[in-house]
Structures are given as C-alpha cells and as structure tokens.
Image (cartoon, rainbow, N blue to C red):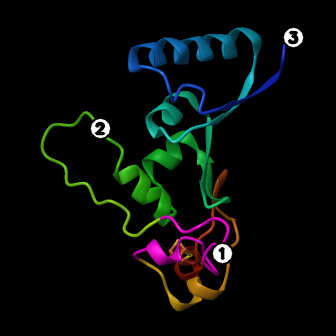
Amino acid sequence: MRPEFLVCDEAVAALDVSIQAQVLNLFMDLRQDFNLTYLFISHDLGVVEHLSDRVLIMYLGRIVEEAPTEALFGDPNHPYTQALLAEVPRLEPGRRIFKPITGEIPSPINPPSGCHFHPRCPHAMDRCRVERPALRPIGPGRFSACHLNDEARG
Ligand code: SF4
C-alpha cells in the first residue's frame, strides 16, 4: 500500500521489552527506507524520546506543550510535562526521590474549569481556575499552554 503517514496508537505498549526493542528498530528502519511519517501515540516517554523528532504532550484532551524532542526532554516548560519527566526511570547512579503528581486525574466528561491541570499543579494561581491558557510560542518551534509564561514575560 506504500503509505506516507502512519498513526501508531500505543503500538508497542503490550509487548515484552525485548520484542519492543526489535519492533522499535523495525519502525526506525521502515521510516528511513520508505521516508515515512509516524504519529506515534504512547504513554512510554522513553519510547517517545527514542523515536520522535517532535513531541506533543496532552492532558485531558488538550495539547499543553509541543517542542522538538531534545528541547522538550532537556528543558520541559509546562508543569505537567515537568512532572511527567521527573517520574521517568533513568540509568543514573545514586538514589532518586520520585515525586508523584498529586491528586486523581479528573473526569474528561466534566473537566476542571480554566486550566484542566490546575487542581494538581503546584503553581496554580487564581487565574488558572477561571481562564484557559492558550497554546503560545515560547521559543523556536516550541509552544506551551501555561499562564506562568505570561507572568515571566511580564
Ligand atoms: S496555567 Fe496555571 S494551573 Fe495550568 S499549568 Fe500553568 S501554572 Fe499550572
């Protein structure tokens, strides 16, 4: 069929880790050989970092951050992205203290007002409870939806 674009929704989530590595390598080889574009949907940030050129982070159905992979993993902007990356296991010497995101994921049927993340965000302000933050540019090829960026801009 020679597709140009593939949507891969949790394509390796159910696989054993050793098989997962083989399938990921196959994905990368096919991308190279057939000049493919993937929309790769995953909860596994290690896999996302390994495979992606650009990353979009979503929370309760909204895009909260978008950036080139290296920029996003090296310097996450949105508090939700920061919290997610803080929980990714890494091969580093020494003990790490994991800080889980507090609170439960709200119902997507009845999401919180304003910023959907405000009940769980350590930086939430009054404005966050009433005003939805827009996805705005924060740097070359980078976008984030957080009122903290307006505060920083003044
Ligand atoms: S808009 Fe407010 S609640 Fe939402 S992520 Fe930014 S600081 Fe936190």
Is the residue 58 above or below the residue 152 in the image?
above
- Which quadrant of the structure image shows residue 30? top right
Q: CA distance from mark 3 to mark 1?
A: 41 Å
Q: Magenta stretch?
A: 105-122
Give the CA distance from mark 1 to mark 2: 31 Å
Q: Which mark is residue 90?
A: 2
Q: Which residue is mark 1?
A: 133
**Which badge, 1 or 2, is on the more N-terminal residue?**
2
Give, as a three-letter code, the residue at label 2. Arg
Residue 76, image x and y in percent?
47, 55
Query: Disc 2 on helix, strand or loop?
Result: loop
Q: Main secondary structure of the magenta part?
A: loop
Residue 128 picture quarter: bottom right
Q: CA distance from mark 3 to mark 2?
A: 39 Å
Q: Which residue is mark 3?
A: 1
Q: How many marks?
A: 3
Identified by mark 3, the residue type is: Met
Q: Residue at x 76, y 16 (%)?
A: 35
Who's the residue at 52% across and 78% down the image? Answer: 152
